[in-house]
Every structure is written in C-alpha cells, then in structure tokens.
C-alpha cells in the first residue's frame, strides 16, 4: 500500500485534523493509499528532545528527525500543516502543561548555571523558532493561487479598506548600521571548514563557532546590527509616532529569527518604556524579567519584586502610555498591545493585514488608525513602503480584477539568509568578529561593540541551481514574466545574481520574460501589473519567499491559507504545505469558549489534491489521479456554494465545511467515468450523505455555543479532541462504511 504522511501539528490545524483526517482516509483507501500521521507538534518535539531521559512509557518518537530523512528519498509524499514556531513564552507554557501531565521535564532556564541547566537549555533551544521547516524543506518552494480560489475571490471579493492620499501610515527602517548595510558575502572556491572568531579590544581571541562545514560554490554571509544605532533609531520613532499622532507598531519575526529578533524586540520595548527601564531596569533584570519576552512577561512577574518596586513599575508603565504615542493593539478588549508578546505580531502576516485595512492598525479604543510600522532592518522594509506608496497614490486593490503574484522561493537545504540560529551572537564587549577558513585566512570581518547582534548565513549551490530551474519551469508552464528579486547593491544578492546569470544559461529561456530587479523596484513593477490584471512570478530568496507568500495572497485572496504550496523535493519526492498563515491561536480560543472552529481547511484540501496527483504520477496509480481530479472539483463546488467556515457561532464552522467536502467529493466520484467500479462503490455513500444533509448539519450545529474541554492546549487529550471535532454520529457512521 502506498502511503502519504500527514503531519500532526498544533492549535487550529491540529483540531481540524481530528475532523478531516478520518474523512480523507476513507476516500484514500479506495485508491490503496494509506495516510499515516507523524507528530511534529511543539509538545511532541519537546518530548522527543528528552527521549533519552524520560521513562520508557513516556518516550516520544522523534518524528521530525524521521521525516528529515524521509524527504531526502524519492518515495517521500508528505503533507505539512502549519506548526508553532515557538517563542520562549510559548515554550514555557507548553513545558508547564507537560509537567502538569506527569512528564518529568526541567524548567526552561534563561541563564543556565549548572551543566544540567545548560543541557536542558540546549535541548529546548533546538525546539524553539523555526525548528521544523528547515528540516523538511529539501526542495524549493512553488506557491501559487489555484485557479478555483482566484476565480472565487473575483466572484466573491473580500473586503478591502479604503485608502486616503493623506494617510500618515509609513514604514520606518534603519538604512544604516543594520544587517543589510553591514553585510559581507563570499562564494566558497572549494569545500572547507570555517571558524567564527571573536577578538575583544582588550584580550585574547575566542572561538564563537568552529567546524562550520561549507561546500564549493556555497555563499557565506556575515553581518551585524549596531545596538547603539538601533536604540537611536527606535527613540526617534517613538518621538515621530507621538509628533504625528499615529500608532507605534513594531513588526519583527521573533519566531523564525529566534535569536536576533527577541533581542531587537527587547530594544523596542525598552525604547517605548525608556523611563521604566532607566528607573527599574536593574531590579527587573535581577528578578529575571527581560524586555525580550515582552511587556506581558514583565507584568506577570511583578510578584517577584517588592511591593514598592512593583507599584513603581506599574506607574512607570501607565506614565509611558500617557506620555508616549498610542501603541497598536493585538487585542483591544483585553489591553494586549503590540509590545506585550514577541510572537504576537509577525511581520509577514501583520504588514499585509495592515495594508489591507487602509494602512491602519487597531488602537486601544478598538478603532483603526494610521500607524508607523517599525521594521528595523532595511533589507526588505522598502517592499512594504512601495506597496503603501502605491495604495496612497492609487487606492486599494480590487480583488475582482487584480492579477496574481505567485512565488518561486529559494529555501532548499536550509538556505538561510535569515534564522542562522547557531551562527547568531549577541556580543558582550567591543572587538572584531572574523570568519576564517581552514588555512587561517580571514574571509571577512566586522568591528563590533557591546550589545551588537552579529550573524552569519549559508546558502548552498545545488539549491540555487534547482531554484533557477524551477523559476524557468514555472515561467514556461504559465507563460508569465518572472522577476528575480535581487539587489546588486547588497552583498548577499550580488553573489546570487552571479549564480543566476550563470545557471540561466543551462536552460532554454527563448521567449521567456526573465528579469533581475531590486526588491523595491520588483515590488513596484508587480503592483503596477496587478492593477492591470497581469500576473508576475516573484522569484525570491528565503525571507521574501516568506513575506511575499503572505503579502500578495492576503491582498488577492484575503488570506495566505488559500495558496497552493508545493515543494518539489530535490531527490524526487513531494512536500505539500497547507498554505501559510500560522496555526491560529485565536481560533482555538473560540473553540474552547464557544465550540466553534473557524479554521479554514482549504489549504489542506489543495495540498491533498496535489499529493494524490504526485502519488498517481510516481506510482502509476490511476485511481489516485481520479481522487485528485474529483477533490479539486469538490473544492471548487465548496467555494462557490459558500460552505467555507464562517466566523460566528451558530454558522457553519470547520466541521461543517468538512462534511460538505465529503458530500461533494462523493458526488464527483459517483458521476466520473474514468473509473466506473469506483463510481459504483461510492454512489451509495453520495446518496446517503445527501439524504442525511439536514440531519448531519443539525448535529454539527447543535454542539455550538457552549465551552468545550479538550484537557490541554499544547498537549490536549486525543480522545477529547476527537469527540469535540466529530460530533455527528450520522456522518461518522457513513464514513465508516466507505472506509470498510
């Protein structure tokens, strides 16, 4: 039996899996395809990290490591759902929950002192941030809006806020002394082993990292952000937001950039609450309360301070709000600001949402207001400014007429450019950081000061070759212009441009429109073409892959979760991601409070269809192709019939949407003629689902409106989740018949 691996993840996608997977398994079984799960949830990854120290009955397979090997094989067929890229607060919450469930796990130590604490921190840090995607992405990214989804958006356009030419919203970025401006880059002439060395102004050199293996043709970068320059920049932005009467808002990626961005976030918090940290910084530090974890962690830890100091801290926070600019809100009703939790505001999702909402964010009065979006590093901040400028000049985009911007993204074999967690360092004193080869020669170096954030990144050559090939393939297949978003004035990009120009010569490019443009110019071109209803492929590195696959889909489709995300693996397998957009913690909250899950599984439907198609092609399984074709048709019907989940309790939710997919899929299978025995087998199921539609819908609706207990958040009870997500006995019984 062929198998598809369906990942078990976190939050809303995990809940949806409990409802959808039994349905999909029933249909897949008709084509001799088995769906197996692998647990790569945050809780599962934590347990796997302590496998060797937990008792036997509590051990957890390291599914991520297993999948990391599997994706290097031609047989791989993996459906990857969104997972938590854990920040420290999320990690701590998951640990607490697992401890309460009886798992003897150590606490997360901020500043480990003993060997045991250092070991625990190293294990937990391996789970933090983007621990999953780099392991699984042994191929480059092909993300595009499926035709059915694009047509639906044109027919039923999502809301777009009106733009004013007088909008004060803008992006603020450093432009100097940041990662972009300080970057140095080299292409390795041969396989080698590098060392990163730090020489303090007064003292002997020390090794930051050694044994860094690199391959011939690999691009290696090094850069740093000046802490002093960052603080000066942030202080100026606090004043600017106040002077202009607009919201102060920071846009970082503390999940993916798990070493650098929490530190930058801490600088932002300190800049806004400058008086607080001037008066009480030492006491907060002594109590283990770090700005890097956000204001919420400080407020939650006030009981660690004496009463007088705690009262002083509260007053200083209140005074900052009173005297400073208003802060953009994450949840106005609960008083959660943009500065409360580092993982709450993720740049690639928050900036498109802001642009879609008239360039505004929510204020403390739950009203939208012009905002100053602070993106400290200038590498890609200009892209968002270009789109904002276009909207100021020309108004909001029109989903009924706008073109599309699919993406071909470089990400295979951990193509870094960001992240690089094991090569990011916060310098404790001034000195020189140098990257040296095995002969002891310095490839490049930087003069740094105390507090500066220094990082190195790597991009291997084979993924670049594959990326160029994929760009040409997609441009040819869709007859669409493709633009490489690369800036010749940036060190990393110069090295890539040289490679792109070389590798394009390996392909037939006659008749294709292929260009290399800086990200800002590429953004301007893309939005000009969008307004004319024209399509443009963005061919980007890893950061812009992340940013563009949210930016354009949110504008075009209302969400990035509706994108088709295919990763053709370098060794011939397939990884099918179920759209971007995170794992939706707010959706979980609503389920727990009201038993309504508004998560839209459209991304899963799209990924499943191409996964079945891959199975059909690679294993010559004609019936799998029938499943793919009919699932696509069923998905189109589901969209046009308006059976996607709605936001409010009492309306159709995720479970209702799954029922309608099951119904439409059965109907499509029953009427197709490519495989008559399959049509005959499924026809009674289609009839029974249709005849029981009213009853099933009522069973699904009746449970809504009251709280539901799943006995955990990061590590819920599987049986309780299944019970909550499969409340229709009628639907379950019909699906069981098909499964047999």
Image (spheres, rainbow, N blue to C red):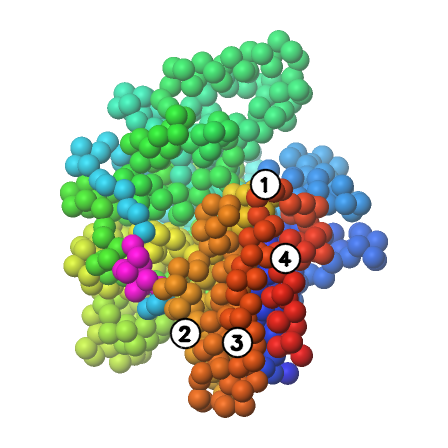
SS of the residue at dot 1? helix
Q: Which sits in the foreground, 500 or 646?
A: 646
Q: Nearer the viewer, mark 2 or mark 4?
A: 4
Q: Is 567 or 445 nearer to us in this picture?
A: 567
Q: Residues within 10 Å of mark 1 (few under 14, many from 20)?
A: some
Q: Which residue is mark 2?
A: 633
Q: Residues within 10 Å of mark 3 (few under 14, many from 20)?
A: many
Q: CA distance from mark 3 to mark 1?
A: 34 Å
Q: Are marks 2 and 1 in contact (CB under 8 Å)?
A: no
What range of the chain is rendered magenta?
149-157
Say which residue label 3 marks.
Answer: 686
Q: Is residue 182 visible?
A: no
Q: Of label 3 and label 2, which has the lower sequence position?
A: 2
Q: Main secondary structure of the magenta part?
A: helix
Measuring from the top left, give residue 280's x and y in whole percent: 55, 16
Q: Residue at x 18, y 33 (%)?
A: 166
Q: Are marks 4 and 3 in contact (CB under 8 Å)?
A: no
Q: Earlier in the sequence, mark 2 or mark 1?
A: 1
Position of the C terminus, as image quadrant, is: bottom right
Task: Tell me where residue 393 appears, x and y as whole percent.
Answer: 15, 43
In front: mark 3 or mark 2? 3
Which structural element holds mark 3? Answer: helix
Which residue is label 4 attached to?
Answer: 727
Q: Residue at the spot x=24%, y=77% of the render? A: 509
């Amino acid at each position: 039996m062929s198998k598809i691996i369906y990942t078990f993840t976190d939050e809303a996608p995990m809940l949806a899996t409990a409802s959808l997977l039994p349905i999909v398994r029933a249909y897949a079984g008709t084509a001799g395809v088995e769906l197996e799960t692998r647990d790569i949830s945050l809780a599962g990854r934590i347990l796997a990290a302590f496998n060797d120290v937990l008792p036997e009955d509590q051990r957890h397979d390291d599914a991520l490591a297993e999948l990391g090997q599997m994706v290097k094989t031609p047989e791989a067929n993996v459906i990857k759902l969104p997972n938590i890229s854990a920040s420290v607060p999320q990690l701590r919450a998951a640990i607490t929950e697992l401890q309460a469930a009886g798992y003897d796990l150590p606490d997360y130590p901020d500043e480990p002192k003993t060997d045991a604490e250092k070991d625990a921190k190293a294990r937990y840090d391996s789970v933090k941030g983007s621990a999953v995607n780099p392991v699984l992405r042994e191929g480059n990214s092909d993300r595009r809006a499926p035709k059915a989804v694009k047509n639906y958006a044109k027919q039923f356009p999502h809301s777009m806020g009106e733009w004013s030419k007088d909008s004060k919203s803008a992006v603020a970025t450093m432009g100097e002394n940041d990662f972009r401006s300080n970057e140095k880059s080299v292409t390795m002439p041969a396989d080698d082993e590098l060392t990163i060395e730090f020489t303090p102004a007064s003292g002997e050199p020390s090794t930051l990292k050694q044994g860094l293996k690199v391959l011939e043709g690999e691009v290696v970068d090094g850069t740093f952000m000046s802490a002093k320059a960052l603080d000066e920049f942030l202080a100026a932005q606090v004043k600017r937001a106040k002077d202009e009467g607009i919201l102060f808002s920071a846009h970082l990626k503390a999940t993916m950039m798990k070493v650098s961005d929490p530190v930058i976030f801490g600088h932002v918090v300190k800049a806004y609450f400058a008086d607080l940290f001037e008066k009480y910084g030492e006491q907060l530090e002594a109590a283990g309360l770090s700005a890097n974890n956000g204001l919420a962690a400080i407020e939650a830890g006030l009981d660690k301070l004496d009463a007088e100091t705690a009262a002083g801290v509260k007053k200083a926070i209140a005074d900052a709000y009173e005297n400073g600019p208003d802060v953009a809100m994450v949840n106005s009703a609960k008083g959660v600001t943009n500065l409360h939790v580092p993982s709450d505001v993720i740049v690639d999702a928050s900036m498109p949402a802001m642009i879609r909402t008239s360039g505004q964010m929510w204020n403390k009065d739950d009203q939208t207001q012009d905002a100053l979006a602070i993106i400290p590093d200038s590498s890609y901040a200009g892209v968002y400014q270009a789109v904002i400028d276009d909207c100021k000049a020309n108004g909001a985009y029109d989903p009924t007429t706008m073109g599309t911007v699919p993406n071909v993204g470089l990400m295979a074999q951990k193509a870094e450019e960001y992240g690089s967690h094991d090569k990011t360092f916060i310098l404790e004193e001034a000195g020189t950081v140098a990257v040296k080869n095995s002969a002891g020669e310095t490839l490049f170096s930087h003069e740094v000061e105390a507090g500066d954030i220094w990082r190195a990144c790597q991009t291997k050559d084979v993924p670049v070759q594959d990326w160029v090939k994929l760009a040409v393939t997609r441009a040819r297949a869709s007859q669409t212009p493709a633009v490489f978003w690369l800036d010749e004035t940036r060190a990393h990009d110069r090295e890539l441009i040289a490679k792109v120009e070389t590798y394009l010569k390996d392909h037939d490019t006659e008749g294709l429109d292929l260009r290399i443009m800086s990200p800002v110019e590429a953004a301007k071109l893309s939005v000009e073409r969008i307004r004319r209803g024209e399509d443009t492929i963005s061919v980007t590195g890893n950061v812009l892959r992340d940013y563009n696959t949210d930016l354009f889909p949110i504008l075009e489709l209302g969400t990035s979760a509706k994108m088709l995300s295919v990763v053709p693996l370098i060794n011939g397998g397939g990884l099918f991601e179920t759209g971007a957009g995170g794992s939706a913690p707010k959706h979980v909250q609503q389920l727990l409070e009201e038993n309504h899950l508004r998560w839209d599984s459209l991304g899963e439907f799209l990924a499943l269809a191409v996964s079945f198609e891959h199975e059909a092609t690679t294993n010559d399984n004609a019936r799998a192709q029938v499943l793919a074709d009919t699932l696509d048709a069923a998905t189109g019907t589901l969209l046009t019939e308006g059976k996607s989940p709605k936001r409010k309790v009492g309306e159709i939710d995720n479970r209702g949407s799954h029922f309608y997919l099951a119904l439409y899929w059965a109907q499509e299978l029953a009427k197709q003629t490519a495989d008559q025995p399959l049509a005959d087998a499924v026809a009674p199921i289609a009839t029974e689902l249709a005849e029981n539609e009213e009853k099933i819908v009522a069973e699904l609706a009746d449970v809504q409106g009251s709280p539901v207990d799943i006995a955990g958040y990061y590590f819920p009870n599987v049986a309780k989740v299944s019970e909550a997500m499969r409340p229709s006995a009628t639907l379950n019984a019909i699906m069981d018949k098909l499964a047999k």
